[in-house]
Image (spheres, rainbow, N blue to C red):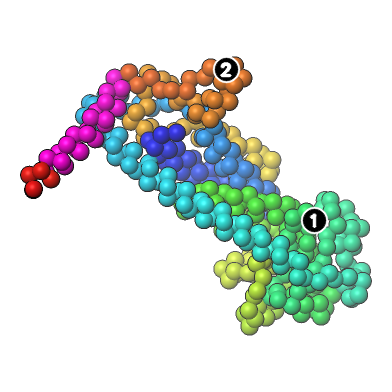
Amino acid sequence: MTSTQFLELVVSLSVQVSVVIITTHWLGKLVNSERAQCRLWTVCYVVLLMLMFVAVLFPHPRFFQPWASIDSQNASTIVSLEMQTGRVLFFVWLAGTTLSLLVFLYRALQVNQFLKTCRAVDPKQYAFAENLNVVNGNTESNIKSQVKLLSSNRLKTPFCSQFHRPYIVIPEYLLEFETQKINFILRHELEHLKTGHPLQLFLQRLVETIFWFHPMIWWASQESSLTREFACDEAAIDSPQEIAQYLRTLLTIIEYGASQQDESPTPLAFGRGKSIIAHRARRLTEIARNHRIPRPFEISGTKASGSLVFVAALIGMIWLPVDVLASPRANWSPWPSWTAGALHDFGFSPNDFDVYSRHTELHELLIEREPLTIRSRAHQMTRRE
């Protein structure tokens, strides 16, 4: 991949990512449940990764060719600028992606090491044992593995995690809470596990690592995090009458956490983030008052996900014509070298080069301009001597 092709890839993918995220947000307002919205954000992250893989591994159509009528001199100037910009963008992206990946792996290692320091909790030793059948595996829950309950005195807010098996980790001070408050916390964390939120969070972090430069990605992360908490809050309460006690439980954890130093890398925390907590409290209050905002039109989560995939398939076919060296004689870009090489090994002969026609002279102009620059500099040095 040349530097001009990389520049075109970055610009086109940035536009495609923005459209997919905006579509996800819009469809999320039409689905009929918070859990369906969570699934929709999971589909969004999968779609974003697929767009990236398709862009890197397959050719794309060229519906627009605005550079066909430009003269060679101006084209060579633009190509030089694009080549320099593409090189800079590549190294900046590579540095940011490498750093983001290292941070991601470091945090995952931190969580794994922290779980090893926690002690196992036997629910039967506490008053809430009879209400923890789901933790003991006696339930119709879709969690395949038995959830393991852990505790730590280094923790200020509960969280859940799932590597080879699901965990729920709670601070030691919560073990002395009354049964109802413990049930709220466990229902909330179990909803994270039952709806696959650890997997969604993994996909979210992966997308953040690749598209770290895109502001819409970080906005989408905030929106999906808020949606996850909304869905788990709904699952934690059985009736609107329990909302007041649930809010008091959340407030107690927040007050304790404000006075203690958190030493844990919590991935799916129960009460982290002041802005998220404020949104959660406001929404729960609206539910208690039966002030749900009516939706003029509702669709199912399946239809929303299908619509998102359809929009992504359409937008993935549209690329911005940034590369001046793209041949005006071809309706498709050439196959990327790594994909073309694999196809050649299986006996296929894909088009892996661009037929530049008159643009061939652009390469000659670029080659000629470089030695001319060197000669002019040498002449200037001679005159100074």
The secondary element bearing badge 1 is classed as loop
The mark nearer the N terminus, 1 or 2, is: 1
The CA distance from mark 1 to mark 2 is 44 Å
Rendering coords of residue 361 (x, y %)? 27, 23
The secondary element bearing badge 2 is classed as loop
Residue 168 is inside the magenta segment? no
The mark closer to the camera, 1 or 2, is 2
In the displayed image of the protein, which residue is found farthest to the front? 385
Write down the residue under mark 2.
348
- Residue at 57%, 46% (x, y): give it: 24
In the foreground, 221 or 80: 80
Q: Quadrant of the N terminus?
A: top left
Query: Can residue 106 be seen here?
Result: yes
Tag shown at residue 165: 1
Residue 362 is inside the magenta segment? yes
Rendering coords of residue 246 (x, y %)? 73, 72
Residue 248 as seen in the image, left or right of residue 99: right
In the foreground, 294 or 106: 106
